[in-house]
Image (spheres, grey):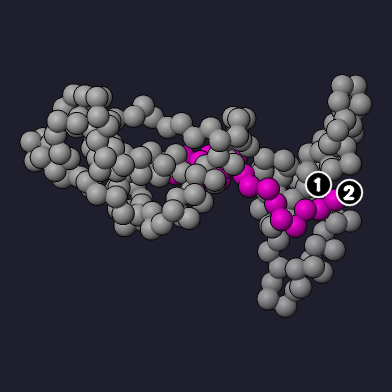
Amino acid sequence: MYELLFVEEDAADLAGAELLAYLDDRLPRLLVSARKLHQSGCQVSLTLTGFQFELHPDETTDPDAELARLVPRCDILGEINDVPIRTIREVGETLNELFDRVWYERKLVYLDEPAPGHPTSVEVIAGMLKAMREVEERYGRDNLIVPDAFSWGMINGKFSALRWVSGFEWDFLKTRPAFPFPSSLSSGRLCVQLGIHAATTRP
């Protein structure tokens, strides 16, 4: 995969009239290149910062040679990024998965360590357990296990970084409203009372 940027690095600080003039010149040329790449058989798609294209050389063709052939043929000007930025869909899907994983692990903590002085209705707990089952069905229960503190830190770090890219402040890790477990009941007893099977211990 290769990427052509909407705004090249040396123009990243432009603003106002200078930026508009730059875009007036660059974007039409990028559109011409994208169209010619598509006509040449390349798959073209958007990234967060430009558009990426994938070469389809045959087994006897070197990818670098194929790229060199396409550059003049498709009027490609400027820098070519050989490590494309992720697509909007990739970022969104990964952010949603990390959201679910952080939320799910926090619910396991609530079930393991009930918060004293915060009674929660049976209906709310039932809704939480139902949502946990949906997350388990989505990713597989075994895949949700967090084996150690390092892995938990990595998950939260990735979540924070993608949140930051999406416009939030650093360390913004809020998920859905908490469902603290009622201190008067054990998690096992409440699950039996509701007739619901749920994970009640942390991995």
Residue nearest the observer in this picture, 38 or 63: 63
Residue 7: quarter of image: top right
Horizontal relation, residue 149 to residue 157: left or right = left
169 lies above or below 187? above
Residue 115, visible in the rendered structure? yes
- Between disc 1 and disc 2, the foreground one is 2
Bounds of the magenta span?
76-97
Residue 77's tag is: 2
Answer yes or no: do the residues labelled 1 and 2 have beta carbons within 8 Å?
A: yes
The image position of residue 18, as x and y in percent, is 92, 26
The image position of residue 52, as x and y in percent, is 70, 49
Which amino acid lies under the numbered mark 2 shown in the image of this protein? Answer: Leu
Q: Which residue is mark 1?
A: 33
Residue nearest the observer in this picture, 26 or 84: 84
- Quadrant, the C terminus: bottom left
Q: Any magenta on residue 198?
A: no
Q: Residue at x 80, y 68 (%)?
A: 64
Residue nearest the observer in this picture, 6 or 142: 142
Disc 1 from disc 2: Cα separation: 9 Å
The image position of residue 131, as x and y in percent, is 28, 36
203 lies above or below 28? below
Label 1, secondary structure: give it.
helix
Residue nearest the observer in this picture, 133 or 50: 133
Q: Residue at x 35, y 40 (%)?
A: 106
Q: Residue at x 72, y 40 (%)?
A: 49
Residue 29: quarter of image: top right
